[in-house]
Image: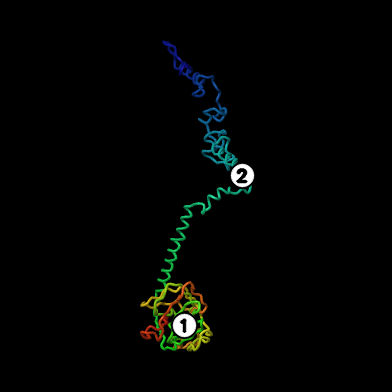
Amino acid sequence: MGGLFNPSPGVEYSDDEIVAKINAAVAKITRLDAVESSAIDLSGKSADDIAEGTINKYDTGAPPLTTDDLLEGDISKYDTGIPPATQDELPDGITAKQFLAIEKTKLATVAEGAQVNPPDLATLDPTADTKLTTVDTKLTEEVTPAISSLDLRLTAYETEVPPVGLIELVSQVANGLDDVSIRMSPPVFEPGAGYKNSCGYINSKNWGDGCAMRFIVNIPQGVKVYKAYLMLWPAGLNSTRVVRSELGVENTLNATRITSLADFLSRPRLVTLWDDIEPFTSPGTWHNSPSLKSHIQYLISNPSWVSGNAIQVFWDDRLDRSDHTQEWTMRMAAYYESVGGSGWAPKFYIAYTLP
């Protein structure tokens, strides 16, 4: 009992005496750390009655309902229980609260409506960064053309898938009076022999060449046109010089032969442009014009169209748009009376399906 009850050597005690001495010693015990201190009356009390700051305040007795009841600054004050609504409610000295105060101080120095400094904006300018400029150049020179090329290939692939029941027709100029040549300056009109079916610019005194070709079309009214284009066989060597032309179909249901330059110029047309024409080669292969599908569909969809009617196709540079930098900026094609036979005369291709 550590000094509270020390029996004398050689002295004998009765049972009652021993019990009495033990009770007296127990009566002096308060807490483990207060055995040597004066007796403290704890009757009817709990650990909550111990003074604030005592290290063992909650060693015994009922704990607080929430950690909010702990002293301000206690490390475990917000370990459990209900957290504060904002960081402002944290006790002074908490790391999170100190950080918030620093950030508020920084924001307080920023003027209302302030913008990013111009030097900072300059660093964001793509033109000021050579790496970004290099990337933009690659996009322009390499990636974009590659995508365009792929798009063209995909488009060509899609248009090459023929519909079920496709019917093809190839009509060819069948008479020397059905392909005529013209020149705007000086004014010239030639049916058949004498001129090739040419288009473009010769020189400052001879320009505005063109031609017209008439085809019999045995297609019933109301069909759906899938493809339609003019086919030309090259006649003579043709340069790579830039030729710009008009391509058109006469806007009439049964075209008649053209008899003069004035007649050529007066015919109503459904027109499209054929510019930057690829070089014709000789000997070579048939060269196809841009699509005339919508032009032919327009005529054949007319309720008055009759199979066996004639269409007339115009190809000329009457507006003199071809390059003038060099003479003989032209494309020349065979005509009905060409040397070698009428097999090289212009053709017209139409693919269609029945309704």
Residues packed near mark 1 inside 10 Å, few (<14), some (14 to 19) or many (20 plus): many
SS of the residue at dot 1? Answer: strand
User: Where does label 2 land, which residue?
Assistant: 110
Residue 254 visible in the shown view:
no
Tell me the number on the disc at residue 149: none
Quadrant housing the C terminus: bottom left
SS of the residue at dot 2? Answer: loop
Left or right of residue 110: residue 207:
left
Closest to the observer: 272 or 331? 331
State how the image is colored.
rainbow
Closest to the observer: 17 or 137? 137
Residue 89 place in picture, x, y as percent: 59, 39
Residue 280 lies, with reference to residue 131, above or below; the image says: below
Looking at the image, the residue that sits furthest to the right is: 112
Residues packed near mark 2 inside 10 Å, few (<14), some (14 to 19) or many (20 plus): few
Indicate the amino acid at tag 2.
Answer: Val
**Which quadrant would residue 87 be assigned to in this image?**
top right
Marks 1, 2: nearer the viewer: 1
Residue 299 place in picture, x, y as percent: 49, 83
Looking at the image, the residue that sits furthest to the front is: 205
Which numbered disc, 1 or 2, marks the residue that appears first in the sequence? 2
Indicate the amino acid at tag 1.
Answer: Cys
User: Where does label 1 land, which residue?
Assistant: 211
Distance between the alpha carbons at the discs numbered 1 and 2: 76 Å
Left or right of residue 151: residue 68:
right
Quadrant housing the N terminus: top left
Residue 233 place in picture, x, y as percent: 39, 80
Residue 116 place in picture, x, y as percent: 58, 48
Residue 155 lies, with reference to residue 301, above or below; the image says: above
Instruction: Tell how many labels.
Output: 2
Q: Are marks 1 and 2 in contact (CB under 8 Å)?
A: no
Residue 213 visible in the shown view:
yes
